Amino acid sequence: MGRTLAFDRDTAVRAAREVFWHFGYAEASLPALEEATGLSRSSIYNSFGSKRGLFDAAVQSYLNEVIRPRLHPLQQAPVQRGALLEYLDGLRDAFSRAAGPPGCLLVNTAGTPLAADNEVARVITDYRIELRTAIGNGVSAYLAGADADVERLADAVTDLVIAAFALVRVAPDVATHTLVTARETITSEQSG
C-alpha cells in the first residue's frame, strides 16, 4: 500500500505558483520553493518528479484558477455585450492595485529560455489561442450588427492585452494605458 501524501498538493502547487510567477522558472530557487510550499527538496522531487514537474503543475493551476475564471464570461454562450469591456477593466484594475505577481506567468515565461522547450511552447501557444478566441467572442458580442472587421479587431485587442502583460513589470502605467487603448479600439468601432 502506497504512502498517503502528508500535504495538500493544491496548496503546495499554489504556493509554488506564486514563487514562479514572481521570479520566473530559472530564478525560482529550490530553497525558495521549499520555504513557500513547506516541502523538503526530496518531497518536491518525490511528488512532482523535478522542479520542472512542479512548474508544470503550477502552470496548470495558473490556467485553471487564474486565467480561465477571468475568461469564463467570454467563453459562455451567449457572451454578454459588455463582457470584453469588463474583462479589460478588470485587468486594468488589477494592474492598478498591483496586488499580486505582476504580469502573466505564461507571457513572462515566453520571454525566457524555457520557452524553447516544445511542451512549454505548446502551452504558451495554446494559451494565446484560448485568449484570442475568448476576446474574439467578446468583440463579436459587443459589435453585433455593426459593420466592423471583427477578426482584425480581435487580433488587435489580443495583441494589446499581451503587450500589457509584458509591460506591467517594467512600466505599469504604460501597461494600464495599453488596456485603455484596447478598450477604445472596441468602443470607437461601435460609435464609428
Image (spheres, grey):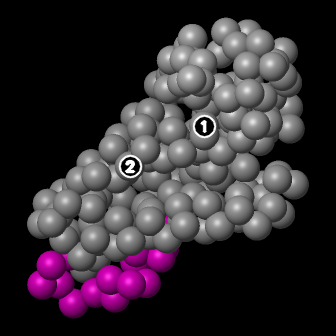
Q: Nearer the viewer, residue 113 or 36?
A: 36
How far apart are labels 2 and 1 at the CA level?
14 Å
Instruction: Indicate which disc residue 97 carries.
Output: none
Assess whether residue 149 is covered by the magenta stretch: yes
User: Looking at the picture, how far across and down is residue 22, in whole percent?
Assistant: 69, 29
Residues in magenta, as a range: 143-158
Residue shown at 32%/83% (left/top)? Answer: 150
Residue shown at 27%/60% (left/top)? Answer: 74
Instruction: Indicate which disc residue 58 carries.
Output: 1
Question: In the figure, 18 relative to 184: above or below?
Answer: above
User: Looking at the picture, how far across and down is residue 132, in whole percent?
Assistant: 44, 70
Q: Which residue is mark 2?
A: 68
Query: Is residue 178 shown to the viewer in this render?
Result: yes
For the C terminus, the quadrant is bottom left
Secondary structure beneath label 2: helix
User: Looking at the picture, how far across and down is residue 13, in whole percent?
Assistant: 58, 28
Quarter of the figure with residue 143: bottom left
Amino acid type for the residue under numbered disc 2: Arg
Label 2 environment density (alpha carbons within 10 Å; few <14, some 14–19, many ≥20): some
**So how many labels did they put on this image?**
2
For the N terminus, the quadrant is top right
Secondary structure beneath label 1: helix
